[in-house]
C-alpha cells in the first residue's frame, strides 16, 4: 500500500516565483525599505535544481511515518540557531480522517526524523490546520496554528494558537498553548504565520504572529509576545482599510535591525490587486502605512480553479546592509 509522505527538499515549486526584493535604505543605516521588482522568472522547465551547481543533487528524506494514504500538506520548517542539526517541521495531516497539526523533529540535520500529532481538542475545538514554525535564539520552537470545529461546513468557530517546545520539538505540552485571536466567534481567523526576532537588541526573542481575520470584516491581525510566549498582546489590526474584499496570506519577517515587516495579498475588486507591505519600527507595538509593493493584474487559472497569489517573505542579513526576498505562490 502506498503512503502519503512529507519530504524535506531544497527546491522551488513550479508555482513559486521570486517576484521582488525589498532592502534596507540606501544609506545602510535607517530602517526604511524600498522594493525592486525582479525580471520575469525563468520558465520552470529550464531551472536547475541547484542553479549554482547543476551537478549537485539533493536527497528527499521522508519525515512522517504513519502508514495511511491520507493527505499531508502545508509544510513549514525551521532550524535551531544554537544547533544546526536540530530541525523541526510541521504540517497538516489527515491520518485520523480529519485535519490535525503534525510535527517532526530531527537531531542529525534532517537525515532521520521522528514525528507525532499535536495534542487534540485544543480549546474544545477538535480540528487543526495552517501551522507554521519558528525558533528563538534560545533554541525553543514555536508553532502557530488554528483550531476549529467544522472542517467541512460553511460556519466555523475556532481560534489562533501558539504552541511551545522547550526540548527541540520533541514535546508540545497543551499547557504551553496560548490563544491569540479576540475569541468573538463571529469572524474566522485563518492562516497564521510566525516569525521570531533574532536580533541582539531589546527585541531579541520577541514572537510575532500575523493572520487573516475574515468573513464579515476583512482585516490582517497581528499579535506579539515579549516574554517567550507566556502571554501575547491584545490583537491590533494592521490594515486600516476594512473595505477590501479579499485579504489573505499575511506573513511577518524580522530585519537584523529589529524592524518587523508584514506582507499580504489584498484585492478591492477584480481590477485592483496588490501585494501589500507594512512595517513596525518599535518591536511590533504599532505599524505604519500600508504600502502596495507589487501589483497583480490577473489571477492564475489552473484547470478552471482560481489560484490566488500568496506572498512569502524572508530576510537575509548581509552587513552593513540586508536584503529581503518576496515570493508569491
Image (cartoon, grey):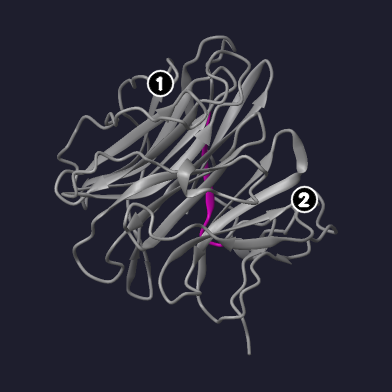
Q: Position of residue 189 (x, y in %)?
A: 29, 48
> In this view of the protein, can residue 40 be seen by the observer?
no
Q: Position of residue 302 (x, y in %)?
A: 39, 70
Considering only vertical position in the picture, is 294 above or below 158?
Answer: above
Q: Position of residue 174 (x, y in %)?
A: 47, 49
Which is nearer the eye, 138 or 222? Answer: 138
For the point 62% across and 37% down, the residue is 140
In the shown orientation, is residue 310 left or right of residue 212? right
Query: Mark 1 = which residue?
Result: 280
Query: Mark 2 = which residue?
Result: 107
Considering every residue shown, the one lying at the far right of the view is 55
Alpha-carbon neighbours of circle 2 within 10 Å: few (<14), some, or many (≥20)?
some
Considering only vertical position in the picture, is 319 above or below 69?
Answer: above
Which is nearer the eye, 318 or 80? Answer: 80
Considering only vertical position in the picture, is 45 above or below 82?
Answer: below
Q: CA distance from mark 2 to mark 1?
A: 35 Å
Magenta residues (range): 14-22
Q: Could you tell me which secondary element the residue under label 1 belongs to? A: strand
- The circle on residue 74 is none
For the point 42% across and 67% down, the residue is 99
For the point 14% across and 48% down, the residue is 216
In the shown orientation, is residue 104 left or right of residue 238? right
Which is nearer the eye, 87 or 295? Answer: 87
> In this view of the protein, can residue 279 be seen by the observer?
yes
Q: Position of residue 29 (x, y in %)?
A: 57, 9
Considering only vertical position in the picture, is 235 above or below 256?
Answer: below
In the shown orientation, is residue 93 left or right of residue 147? right
Q: Quadrant of the N terminus?
A: bottom right
Amino acid at each position: 500500500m502506498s503512503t502519503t509522505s512529507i519530504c524535506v527538499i531544497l527546491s522551488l515549486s513550479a508555482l513559486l516565483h521570486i517576484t521582488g526584493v525589498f532592502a534596507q535604505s540606501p544609506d545602510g543605516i535607517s530602517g526604511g525599505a524600498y522594493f525592486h521588482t525582479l525580471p520575469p522568472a525563468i520558465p520552470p522547465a529550464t531551472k536547475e535544481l541547484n542553479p549554482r551547481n547543476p551537478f549537485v543533487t539533493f536527497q528527499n528524506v521522508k519525515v512522517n511515518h504513519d502508514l495511511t494514504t491520507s493527505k499531508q500538506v502545508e509544510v513549514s520548517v525551521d532550524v535551531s540557531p544554537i544547533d544546526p542539526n536540530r530541525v523541526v517541521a510541521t504540517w497538516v495531516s489527515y491520518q485520523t480522517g480529519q485535519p490535525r497539526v503534525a510535527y517532526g523533529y530531527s537531531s542529525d540535520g534532517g537525515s532521520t526524523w521522528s514525528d507525532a500529532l499535536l495534542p487534540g481538542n485544543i480549546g474544545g475545538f477538535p480540528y487543526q490546520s495552517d501551522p507554521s514554525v519558528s525558533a528563538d535564539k534560545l533554541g525553543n520552537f514555536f508553532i502557530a496554528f488554528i483550531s476549529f470545529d467544522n472542517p467541512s461546513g460553511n460556519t466555523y468557530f475556532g481560534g489562533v494558537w501558539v504552541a511551545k517546545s522547550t526540548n527541540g520539538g520533541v514535546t508540545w505540552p497543551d499547557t504551553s498553548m496560548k490563544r491569540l485571536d479576540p475569541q468573538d466567534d463571529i469572524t474566522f481567523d485563518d492562516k497564521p504565520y510566525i516569525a521570531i526576532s533574532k536580533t541582539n537588541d531589546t527585541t531579541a526573542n520577541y514572537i510575532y504572529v500575523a493572520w487573516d481575520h475574515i468573513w464579515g470584516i476583512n482585516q490582517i491581525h497581528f499579535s506579539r509576545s515579549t516574554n517567550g510566549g507566556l502571554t501575547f498582546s491584545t490583537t491590533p489590526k494592521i490594515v486600516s482599510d476594512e473595505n477590501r474584499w479579499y485579504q489573505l496570506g499575511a506573513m511577518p519577517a524580522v530585519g537584523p535591525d529589529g524592524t518587523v515587516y508584514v506582507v499580504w495579498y489584498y484585492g478591492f475588486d477584480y481590477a485592483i490587486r496588490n501585494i501589500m507591505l507594512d512595517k513596525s519600527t518599535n518591536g511590533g507595538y504599532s505599524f505604519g502605512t500600508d504600502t502596495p509593493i507589487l501589483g497583480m493584474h490577473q489571477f492564475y487559472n489552473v484547470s478552471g480553479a482560481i489560484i490566488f497569489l500568496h506572498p512569502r517573505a524572508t530576510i537575509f542579513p548581509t552587513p552593513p546592509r540586508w536584503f529581503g526576498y518576496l515570493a508569491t505562490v
